[in-house]
Image (cartoon, rainbow, N blue to C red):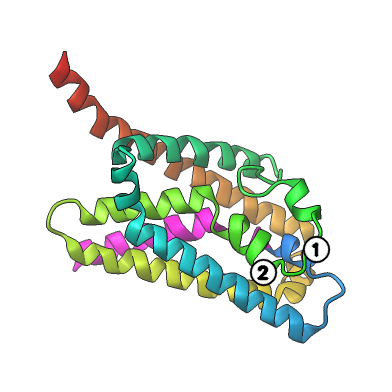
């Protein structure tokens, strides 16, 4: 039971911190400015659902795709760790991480902002995809297939949280203000940096034995 609780907490904290729906609130307000409440609610729902399906797809099929491309999980852990570390540094500096979304993607005119850029790449960006793939790879390692459930549940909970934060974005922005959001973003950035280093450590640990055997 302790293993179930431990891995569930690790999965939920990793997915939630990387997706970081709280930091996405200002982008949602900017992209939906001028829309009526009904349309904002619809946009929030579509963005959360799209992010959920994208992350779930990569969680279930990502390892197969990378295997076909000849990419090892160890290499993906290391690449994901580097990407998450770059994002974490931007968050700690209170800068919008360009690895998640760029200024041109925010400013580009489009009819439906729910899918692009809110769902992709803001919520289900490269860092989020890397995280769910690595977690799923860890869950499938060995005989602990039950660990797949916490990963998928973490994606669902995070997507639901994103919908709630978007749905009440105006109230959250008014309550926390830019200062409050900035503080939360820096705390999330610190946690994300720790997750990034853990990915790098795990990837290196998986990679080194193969190198040493060839020497």
* Magenta part of the chain: 1-24
Q: Quadrant of the C terminus?
A: top left
The mark closer to the camera, 2 or 1, is 2
Q: Main secondary structure of the magenta part?
A: helix
Which of the numbered marks, if any, corresponds to residue 114? Answer: 2
Q: Quadrant of the N terminus?
A: bottom left
Q: Does 69 sit left or right of 87 as displayed?
A: left
Q: Is residue 116 visible?
A: yes
Farthest residue, direction top: 215
Q: Does 94 sit left or right of 161 as displayed?
A: right
Which of the numbered marks, if any, corresponds to residue 30? Answer: 1
Marks 2/1 in contact by CB < 8 Å: the verdict is no
Instruction: Give 116 or 133, whichever is nearer the viewer.
Output: 116
* 6 inside magenta stretch: yes
- Could you tell me residue 127's position as x and y percent? 50, 48
Q: Is residue 202 visible?
A: no
User: Dividing the picture into quarters, in which one does residue 181 lie?
Assistant: bottom right
Q: Which residue is at 61% across, 75% downward?
A: 46
């Amino acid at each position: 039971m302790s293993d179930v609780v431990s891995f569930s907490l690790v999965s939920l904290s990793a997915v939630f911190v990387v997706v970081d729906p709280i930091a996405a609130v200002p982008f949602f307000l900017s992209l939906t400015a001028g829309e009526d409440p009904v349309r904002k609610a619809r946009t929030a729902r579509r963005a959360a659902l799209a992010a959920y399906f994208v992350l779930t797809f990569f969680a279930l099929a990502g390892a197969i795709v990378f295997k076909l491309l000849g990419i090892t999980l160890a290499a993906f852990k290391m690449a994901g760790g580097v990407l998450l570390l770059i994002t974490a540094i931007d968050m700690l500096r209170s800068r919008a991480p360009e690895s998640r979304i760029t200024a041109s993607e925010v400013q580009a005119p489009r009819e439906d902002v729910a899918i692009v850029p809110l769902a992709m790449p803001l919520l289900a960006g490269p860092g989020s995809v890397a995280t769910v793939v690595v977690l799923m790879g860890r869950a499938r390692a060995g005989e602990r297939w039950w660990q797949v459930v916490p990963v998928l549940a973490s994606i669902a909970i995070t997507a639901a949280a994103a919908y709630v934060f978007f749905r009440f974005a105006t109230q959250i922005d008014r309550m926390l203000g830019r200062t409050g959001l900035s503080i939360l973003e820096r705390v999330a950035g610190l946690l994300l940096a720790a997750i990034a280093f853990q990915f790098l450590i795990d990837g290196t640990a998986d990679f080194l034995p193969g190198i040493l055997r060839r020497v």
